[in-house]
Amino acid sequence: MPPLDAATVMTRSVATVSPDDTIGRVAQLLTERSISAVPVVGPEGLLVGMISEGDLMRPFGQEHAMRREWWLNLVAEGTALADDFLDYLRLDRHSVRDLMNPNVITASESATLPQIADLLSKHRIKRVPILRDGKLVGIVSRADIIRALAQADAAAIQSP
């Protein structure tokens, strides 16, 4: 049996978002597809980043809220700010571009499963976008690798 590569095991129908999409659109897509991250693709079809559930949660965390409160106190200089202005600032108005990770670990279609597994382990990531000429053609997740290993093992058991 020839070594398995990214082209053999990758998911080809990959959900994507654009850098200008809203965070609400990303949250809806992640929920509908039961996935935890999505590639960000620019107008030319080039991969420009990834955005995950963790990225979406960052603006709502306690650390971010404390920094925002410090900043508001500095701006207000001891005076009360209008409630409408405070409500506006509390709403998340980020776009994908604001929260995505632009430093994405990628692989080519010819990358072997051990090479991809090494990337996942070394960089502590859960998925690797697969590129051809800078354009997204698929994605390999940890689940894809486990599935391929299980299928290869089952095939080995069945053959004499």
Image: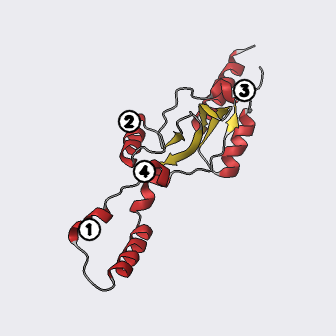
| Left or right, 72 with reference to 97 | left
Q: How many marks?
A: 4
Residue pointed to by mark 1: 85
In the image, residue 157 sits, relative to residue 16, either above or below, namely: above
Which residue is painted at 48% across and 43% down in the image?
Answer: 36
Residue pointed to by mark 2: 32
Query: Residue 97: image x %, image y %?
Result: 49, 50
Q: Quadrant of residue 108?
A: top right
Compare residues 28 and 86 and report the one nearer the observer.
86
Mark linked to residue 4: 3
| Left or right, 44 with reference to 110 | left
Q: Nearer the viewer, mark 2 or mark 4?
A: 4
In the image, residue 89 sits, relative to residue 149, either above or below, namely: below
Query: Do residues under tags 3 and 2 come within 8 Å of each other at their CB atoms?
Result: no
What type is the residue that disc 4 sits on?
Answer: Ser
Query: Residue 75: image x %, image y %?
Result: 36, 78
In the image, residue 68 sits, relative to residue 88, either above or below, namely: below
Q: Quadrant of the C terminus?
A: top right
Local secondary structure at mark 2: helix
Q: Residue furthest front?
A: 44
Local secondary structure at mark 3: loop
Q: Nearer the viewer, mark 3 or mark 1?
A: 1
Query: Do residues under tags 2 and 1 come within 8 Å of each other at their CB atoms?
Result: no
Q: Nearer the viewer, mark 2 or mark 1?
A: 1
Compare residues 71 and 5 and report the one nearer the observer.
71
Query: Residue 150: image x %, image y %?
Result: 63, 28
Q: Quadrant of the N terminus?
A: top right
Residue pointed to by mark 4: 95
Neighbourhood count class around disc 3 (C-alpha, 10 Å): few under 14, some 14–19, many 20 upward: some
Compare residues 108 and 78 and report the one nearer the observer.
78
